[in-house]
Amino acid sequence: MNVALKTSQPGPAPDRLFAVARDRLPGAGPVAQARARAFEAFAQQGLPNRRIEQWKYTDLRAKLGEVAPLAPPPGDTALAGAAAAVKKLAASSGALTFVLVDGVYAASLSANATTVPGVRVRSLREFLDDPAEAARAEVLTSGAGEAMESLNAAMATDGLVIEVAAGAALTSAIRLVHVATRSAASAFTRSVVTVGRGAQATVVEQFVAAPGAAGYQSHDALVVRLAEDARLQHVRLMEEALDAANISHAYFTLDARARLNSFNLTRGAGLSRYQGVVTLAGEGGELATNGVNLLGGQRHGDTTLLVDHQAPGCVSREAFRSVLDQQGHSVFQGRIVVRPGAQQTDGKMMTRALLLSDEAEIDNKPELEIFADDVSCGHGATAGALDQTLLFYLMARGLPEVDAQAMLIEAFVGEAIETIADDAWREVAFDAARRWLSARD
Amino acid sequence: MALLEVKDLHVRVEEREILHGLTLTVNKGEVHAIMGPNGSGKSTLSHVIAGKPGYQVTDGEILFKGEDLLAMAPDERAAKGVFLAFQYPVEIPGVATMTFLRTALNAQRKARGESELSTPDFLKKVREVAARLSIPQDMLRRGVNVGFSGGEKKRNEVLQMALFEPSLCILDEMDSGLDIDALRVAADGVNALRSPERAMVVITHYQRLLDYIVPDVVHVMSKGRVVKSGGKDLALELEASGYAQFEDAAA
């Protein structure tokens, strides 16, 4: 897949990338200035390479080669293809679906949220173009100036701005579907979710391709803020085309006693990086962040997580599973930082890999950085093959080898998928895992 | 035609030969006991019949209902009606017992060209069998054998035997790790499955189990061969005199 991306027609030089796209990007004044600064930050650093510690196992300069040009806005054909792709997706009934096609919000394929009490949904374009929004430039400056995040801030064409009102308990999940219909082009999206004090919500993100989309890139960012006592279930299912690239960022900030359960499944894309930063900013926050990488062929999937305990008395749990076939390569970098004063922190991280082939590869890198003295933190990492004794037991009971393997693999990844609290979305995640098990691609 | 015919079977594990020309014939309706000291090759025989990897058959053959069993994968053997009750049933976290039972049963039925059991029919059948074996419903919801006691694990093996209705049951050291009450429950479950259409091979080190599952034929194994066969009284004789006499016979 690296080859496919590298041999696509030469994209614009970095400076041109922004210059050509500029007039299509929403937001004037402070927004445009924020974009220019963000692009400057990206242009100075360029694509991350292996000499940058955080990108050691995922050298974008080598694997991605270059950033593909911005995809054209979707026309009728693209929208029809996207509608068909969305229709095919399993979803829990009653979800409020919002669709982004090649990085552009498609109102005609999306729910009408104005009728749902307790939630306000706008497109990012509408939000950035609204001069009455004093804070509109801020959504482009939530990152730490890291290259890929800066690129996303500079180029973000659209996305969703979701506000859940204080005290609201949403019964319907809010679902963002990213559909690619493009080939050899990029989409840049950025979405913002704020969950008000004491409110409860479920947000689901799905990344899929319409038939025919190939060799494309998706650059996404999600910025989430949970106010005091808010609760959020976040489910991300990444099922991009197998020759696509997905570079995503997620920022979560939890105020006091907020609870976040976040799950990510990487089943698509030839090259992917999911980079999450969770900041426990208020006392008594609770975080569960779990993930599954399912990778065959020559695919490369990187999950990099930073859990930042800034306030005392917070709990964080990370369970990460990867299953690798053929020459699949999974990377898990998990760092727990406990700041001075974040006493009574309880942080645990466990990552396990199952290698189904001799050529598969896993890089597990758990890290703890603790600057407080009264904490309980731990991490563990394992990697191994399927247990032959269990496999024989299942076969001796009549399961063909492939089915026996699938049953054991499903149980292995199930430990992470089971953490999704919502029954319907847990089943959707299991279905995505089963689709991989039957294809092992 | 005999149900199971093992002819002059030679089996190696790595460089060591464990079975040196073993011959055994089992007809349907019969219960055979295979006794012998540790290391005589009893468990190896059961593993080779079920198809466990890691054993190399260098000579001889195994026919099941006249077909070459050694040419079949373990799952094909199961579908044909071979069932091995494991000495140490494995724990499979994350796979609910009910899901496992249903997947296995339907895989066997599919391999035989039969239709899958409907959910109500399956549940009815499992509940019936579980009740007979005093297996509580919550055990069926747990991971396969996870947190089960030794007795519960063996009862779960008998439950599968009852559900899959195999024509040959091989019980590998079913008595190991069981107290007398647990043994009785498991043995009652096995006895309920005795039928003119089904044969059983009961592998055991001790005579005790044979008080509960009374065999038609008893074989004594030593050093990789059957060295003596006889009626059920042979087991009692062994209990009195021990295996030492046969060690010489095999040499």
Image (spheres, coloured by chain):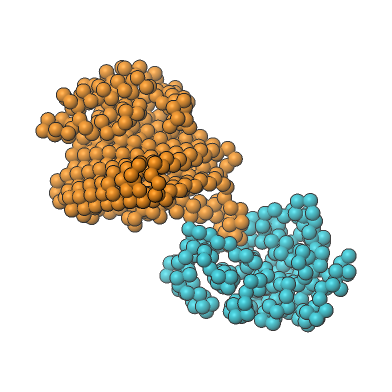
Chain colours: A orange, B cyan
Residue at 25% across / 43% down in the picture?
A: A225
In the image: residue B106, left or right of residue A392: left
x, y percent for residue A437: 48, 48
Is residue B96 at least partly visible in the picture?
A: yes
User: Which residue is more in the foreground, A89 or A269?
Assistant: A269
Does residue A210 lie above or below A342 as drawn? above
Taking the view exactly as shown, the residue that stands out farthest to the left is: A132
Q: Is residue B129 left or right of residue A347?
A: right
Q: Nearer the viewer, residue A377 or A114?
A: A377
Seen in the picture, residue A254 relative to B211 is either above or below; the reply is: above
Q: Residue furthest front?
A: A373
Residue A50 vs B86, above or below: the answer is above
Name the residue at 37% across, 24% down.
A67
Residue A89 drawn at (x, y percent)? 33, 46
Q: Can you see residue A59?
A: no
> In terms of image quadrants, where is residue B176?
bottom right
Residue under the point 83% across and 79% down: B241
Q: Position of residue A417 (x, y in %)?
A: 41, 52
At x 49% / y 47%, what residue is drawn? A380
Q: Is residue A53 left or right of residue A143?
A: right
Question: Residue A183's spot in the image, x, y percent?
Answer: 36, 28
Q: Nearer the viewer, residue A413 or B109?
A: A413
Count of marks, rendered view:
0
